[in-house]
Image (cartoon, rainbow, N blue to C red):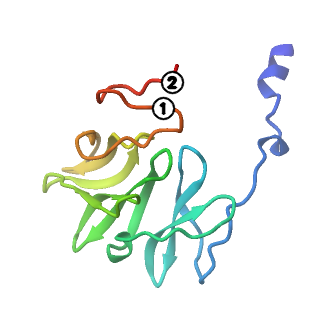
């Protein structure tokens, strides 16, 4: 009985410190595909605007919308994923009849396109917190599988404060 009490302690609805994300405004509808940066400062989500699914990026908790340089030209969007500090935003975009995986570097404004073989259709993606790897669920011949991509040669690491990358290896904590 005591074990059950320990397992369920903190299970009540008031114990999580829950709050709603700030409203987006501008006639947007429901949010979908939420992604929170590792440090919790940015929230990316997909909303419908003008009949197209669009990624919006908001500072938390202020709700201020953060502009994105390149993504507004490539719509609709789905499956956003943020790196630790929100420097990188990975998302699937529609270009003609194909869906593409792209990463916007918010620090430099660069847009990285990730080429996939012609018979692979990306469905969802997830960016690692440091921005060095990307997992993409792809459909190929009607079957779903996950592909991992090493981005270490393309992107600088987006690390939490206090961590430094040394020699391209695993980040180490400061002494």
* Residue ID at (30%, 58%): 102
> Is residue 82 shown to the viewer in this render?
yes
As drawn, the residue found furthest toward the left would be 118
User: Image height check: is 117 above or below 175?
Assistant: below
Q: CA distance from mark 2 to mark 1?
A: 6 Å
Depth order, front residue of 75/37: 37
Q: Does residue 132 appear left or right of residue 114 in this picture? A: right
Depth order, front residue of 103/7: 103
Q: Does residue 21 appear left or right of residue 103 in this picture? A: right
Q: Quadrant of residue 151?
A: top left
User: Image height check: is 2 above or below 38?
Assistant: above
In the rendering, at what x and y percent does residue 154 appear? Answer: 24, 46
* Residue ID at (81%, 20%): 6
Q: Does residue 47 appear left or right of residue 72 in this picture? A: right
Residue marked by disc 1: 163
Earlier in the chain: of badge 2 and badge 1, it is: 1
Residue marked by disc 2: 174
> Is residue 1 shown to the viewer in this render?
no
* Residue ID at (52%, 19%): 175
User: Image height check: is 49 above or below 77?
Assistant: below
Q: Are marks 2 and 1 in contact (CB under 8 Å)?
A: yes
In the rendering, at what x and y percent does residue 142 appear? Answer: 24, 51
Depth order, front residue of 93/154: 154
Q: Residues within 10 Å of mark 1 (few under 14, many from 20)?
A: few
| Label 2 residue SS | loop
| Label 1 residue SS | loop
In the rendering, at what x and y percent does residue 68 appear? Answer: 43, 69
Query: Looking at the rendering, in which quadrant would you find the N terminus?
Result: top right
């Amino acid at each position: 009985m005591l074990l059950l009490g320990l397992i369920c302690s903190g299970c009540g609805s008031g114990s999580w410190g829950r709050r709603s994300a700030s409203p987006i405004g501008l006639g947007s509808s429901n949010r979908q595909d939420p992604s929170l940066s590792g440090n919790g400062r940015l929230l990316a989500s997909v909303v419908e605007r003008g009949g197209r699914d669009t990624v919006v990026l908001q500072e938390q908790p202020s709700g201020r919308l953060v502009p994105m340089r390149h993504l507004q030209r490539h719509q609709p969007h789905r499956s956003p994923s943020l790196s630790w500090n929100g420097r990188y935003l990975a998302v699937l975009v529609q270009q003609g009849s194909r869906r593409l995986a792209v990463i916007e570097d918010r620090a430099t404004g660069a847009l990285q396109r990730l080429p996939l073989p012609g018979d692979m259709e990306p469905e969802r993606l997830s960016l690692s917190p440091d921005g060095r790897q990307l997992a993409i669920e792809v459909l190929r011949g009607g079957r779903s599988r996950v592909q991992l991509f090493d981005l270490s040669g393309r992107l600088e690491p987006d690390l939490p404060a206090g961590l430094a990358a040394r020699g391209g290896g695993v980040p180490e904590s400061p002494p």
